[in-house]
Amino acid sequence: MKRFIVIFLIVCAAVSGCQKKTDGEITEKKEDQAKNIVVNTTGSQKENKEAEPPSKEEVLAMREIVQEGMKKEDIKRMREAVTAANLALENRFFYSNLEERLADPGDAVWNYLHETGEIVEGYAFDEDVWDKKEEEGLTEREYEQKYGDKVYNTNEYDADRILRVLAEIKSTIRNEDLVCDFGRIIADVKEAKESHDAKCIMEIYRILHDMDYYLLRYGQEDVSAGVKDLSTLKLYYGELTCYKK
């Protein structure tokens, strides 16, 4: 039986609006998983405990401010893209060992930033070779080449195409603070492509999380229906520029 490692660098498809989920499709989270994501995506649990999330009233008021001057269709596109990217990344961080794979600069998951069309996204291994890596002292790449079967997927959006989509969304925004935050995401995508630094993807996730749950939506109400564990929705990373003034 094959053990397939199938992980998507969801920023590529989701930011472009290719992947969408409804509020009711959010998978329930366990509290210990939520605590882990705080530590692992920031490097400082204390810092996040001190970040006071904005109230519903503050979110609604700030939303009007940052969306002022935008066309309705542009607001809708921005919201859908941010929500899709946040939910997809969130799901992969919690349930599909995305952070572990991103920590390896040579992992095939990074191919999503460089290639379009049919790409190698990971490797499958027979159960009887799972212990060969340690037994033979192989590196990860050597193990993949010697015992792995390539797993392919189709990718429409590499980093360059994502950057064009982000730039298009950014060009419709009139608020300087929101422009700044989209600029940070753009810079992180560029750096991630060049360096394969997992910290860039982590920051993208934190920005998208706050932007989705504490700006473009109010997660504790807009997303909470059918979700028993609200720990993830209550997390606030303090990343948005508009709340720092």
Image (spheres, helix red, strand yellow):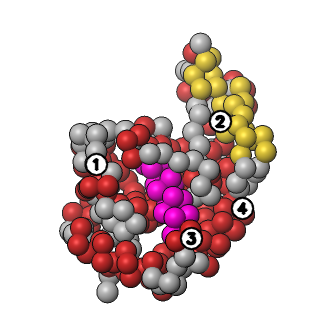
Reading the chain from its start, which is encountered first: label 2 or label 4? 2
Reading the chain from its start, which is encountered first: label 3 or label 2? 3
Q: Secondary structure at mark 3?
A: helix
Q: Secondary structure at mark 1?
A: loop
Which residue is tagged 2?
A: 122
Which residue is tagged 1?
A: 224
Residue 32, by quadrant, is: top left
> Which three-letter amino acid code belongs to the residue tagged 1?
Ser
Q: Nearer the viewer, mark 1 or mark 3?
A: 3
Distance CA(mark 2)–CA(mark 4): 22 Å
Q: Nearer the viewer, mark 1 or mark 4?
A: 1
Q: Is residue 96 visible?
A: yes
Which residue is tagged 4?
A: 161
Distance CA(mark 1)–CA(mark 4): 33 Å
Instruction: Categorize mark 4 by other alpha carbons within 10 Å: few (<14), some (14-19), many (20+).
Output: some
Reading the chain from its start, which is encountered first: label 1 or label 3? 3
Label at residue 74: 3
Reading the chain from its start, which is encountered first: label 1 or label 2? 2
* Of 61 and 205, the residue lying toward us: 61
Instruction: Categorize mark 3 by other alpha carbons within 10 Å: few (<14), some (14-19), many (20+).
Output: some
Q: Secondary structure at mark 2?
A: strand
> Which three-letter amino acid code belongs to the residue tagged 4?
Arg
The x, y position of residue 54, in whole percent, is 25, 71
* Of 188 and 179, the residue lying toward us: 179
Tags 2 and 4 in contact by the CB under 8 Å rule? no
